[in-house]
């Protein structure tokens, strides 16, 4: 019984990282990278047009709050004029959003 509980605990932690593989989460590659770039620098054509921030910049990271990043992912981002800058990704689970938040935090230099 003790071994079973230990195995379940280890798998509960290891499986999400095994599917993530230490690289970019699949959602980053399919939903985010086209604007934010593979390394979060916002250096794509679309990212430049929309004014994406360089998520690897320490000052940008300092201004981000995890709950704000999660809200932006789930609800999208609009300009002061109400123009959509980032569509909402409300189809993502809370776990997927938190995985993206953690991944974004990993861009900090």
Image (cartoon, rainbow, N blue to C red):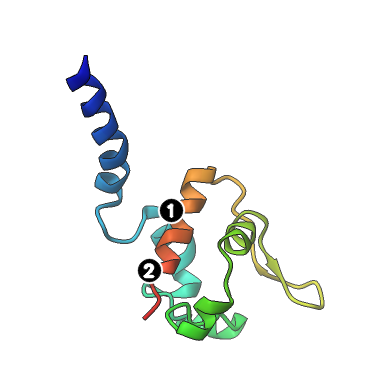
Q: Is residue 46 left or right of residue 72?
A: left
Whether residue 55 can be seen here: yes
Residue 35 spot, x, y in % from top left: 50, 73
Judged from this view, the residue extending furthest toward the top is 1
Could you tell me which quadrant the N terminus lies in?
top left
Q: Is residue 40 left or right of residue 22?
A: right
Q: Which mark is residue 99?
A: 1
Q: Is residue 10 left or right of residue 103?
A: left
Q: Residues within 10 Å of mark 2 (few under 14, many from 20)?
A: some
Q: Residues within 10 Å of mark 1 (few under 14, many from 20)?
A: many
Q: Is residue 59 left or right of residue 2?
A: right
Residue 109 spot, x, y in % from top left: 36, 81
Q: Contact (CB < 8 A) between labels 1 and 2?
A: no
What residue is disc 2 on?
Answer: 106
- SS type, badge 2: loop
- SS type, badge 1: helix
Distance between the alpha carbons at the discs numbered 1 and 2 = 11 Å
Q: At 43% across and 60% down in the image, what residue appears?
A: 102
Q: Is residue 101 above or below residue 7?
A: below
To which quarter of the image does residue 22 belong? bottom left
Mark earlier in primary sequence (1, 2): 1
Q: At 28% across and 31% down in the image, what residue appears?
A: 9
């Amino acid at each position: 019984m003790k071994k079973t509980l230990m195995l379940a605990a280890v798998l509960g932690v290891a499986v999400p990282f095994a599917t993530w593989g230490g690289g970019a989460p699949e959602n980053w590659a399919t939903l985010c990278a086209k604007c934010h770039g593979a390394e979060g620098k916002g250096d794509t054509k679309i990212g430049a047009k929309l004014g994406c921030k360089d998520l690897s910049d320490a000052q940008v990271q300092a201004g981000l709050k995890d709950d704000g990043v999660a809200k932006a992912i789930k609800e999208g981002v609009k300009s002061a004029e109400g123009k959509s800058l980032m569509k909402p990704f409300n189809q993502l689970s809370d776990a997927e959003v938190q995985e993206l938040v953690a991944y974004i935090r990993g861009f900090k230099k």
